[in-house]
Image: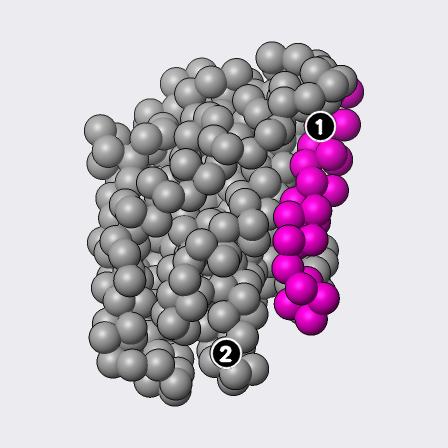
Amino acid sequence: MHSIAVYQEHFLAHLENQKILKEPKNLYEPIDYILRLGGKRMRPVLTLMATEVFDVDYKKALPAATAIEVFHNFSLVHDDIMDDAPLRRGKETVHEKWNLNTGILSGDAMLILAYQYFEKYEPTIFRDLAKLFSKTALEVCEGQQYDVDFETRDDVTIPEYLKMIEYKTAVLVGAAMKMGAIIAETSEENANLIYDFGLNLGIAFQLQDDYLDCFGNPETFGKQVGGDIIENKKTYLYLKAMEFAKPEEREQLLHLYSIQPNDNSEKVESVKDFFNQTGASNATKKAIEDFTMKAFDTLNKMQITEDKKMVLKAFGEKLMKRDV
């Protein structure tokens, strides 16, 4: 097996060789643009890694890994439109650089393009990949809708929030890994277990993102610390604070989440104090640890060699020690 950096390097070389630029250029140029904007390429890397975990050459998984990356970027193009976001990875978003209609149409084309990469596989593998992909794509849409719905609700529960981040973020991580298992033609049990590994790690990752958004190091986090508080997002931290707070504290927190001052620094610090005082910060760290351990528990049941289990565990541990 290879290191993450080597998988990234091989995947990027493969992506460079894809003939995406063709006519009409106003459809395909935005696709080429978003795919070249960078990012860690973690989802395609997971597909390559999972394939080799089950003793099959990662090169066989390159088309499926490309499908995952194209789909992920398609979702970003449409998310940016929904959020009216001006920047993505420090560069203009597609709909800002071109226009709204181009963003919608190029995004649609990316979804179809993603499916075409599965045509590189024989019928049985194609069928299983497409079936998993369709289920996952629909769940991502459902997760996005839950996220939108939660913006106007004051009664979101912890289980609802966990379901939202599972669908919006974690299912794609699980699917990326299961695709590697499908390509390697391992047992159904192994395929389901590595999906669960990715799913639980994906939930832990998103909860950690919530935590870092609030308590991360501004120099390494890569985006504005406290952004979720400024946007009044009801994250796991917020929901736990509401659960633990006394009635008068709850009123104060609700008030802080109803205002948008010109200078947000005082609001951010007040909310962070609330998260610490109520125990929401520690509860979030505990949830991150619990979902990470849940992911690691699946490794004990997987029919793979101990060294492969250690590779997956090391990857999970590295992911959970990040400060960006």
Tell me: 304 left or right of 188.
Answer: left
As drawn, 14 above or below 236: above
Residue at 70 percent across and 47 percent down: it is 116
Q: Which residues are drawn in magenta?
A: 100-127
Using the rendered view, name the quadrant where residue 285 is placed: bottom left
Q: Is residue 35 above or below residue 163?
A: above
Q: Which residue is mark 2?
A: 186
Q: In this figure, which residue is indicated by the disc labeled 1?
A: 106
On the image, the x and y values in percent for residue 35 come to 53, 31
Decide which of 265, 134 is in the foreground and name it: 134
Which label sits in the foreground, 2 or 1? Answer: 2
- Kindly identify the amino acid type of the residue bearing the numbered disc 1: Ser
Given residues 283 and 13, the one toward you in this image is 13
Instruction: Identify the residue shown where x is 37% and y is 34%.
Output: 226
Main SS type for the magenta part? helix
Residue 181 in sight here: no
User: Dot 2 lies on which element?
Assistant: loop
Could you tell me which residue is drawn at 42 percent across and 43 percent down? 11
Residue 298 in view in this figure: yes
Q: Secondary structure at mark 1?
A: helix
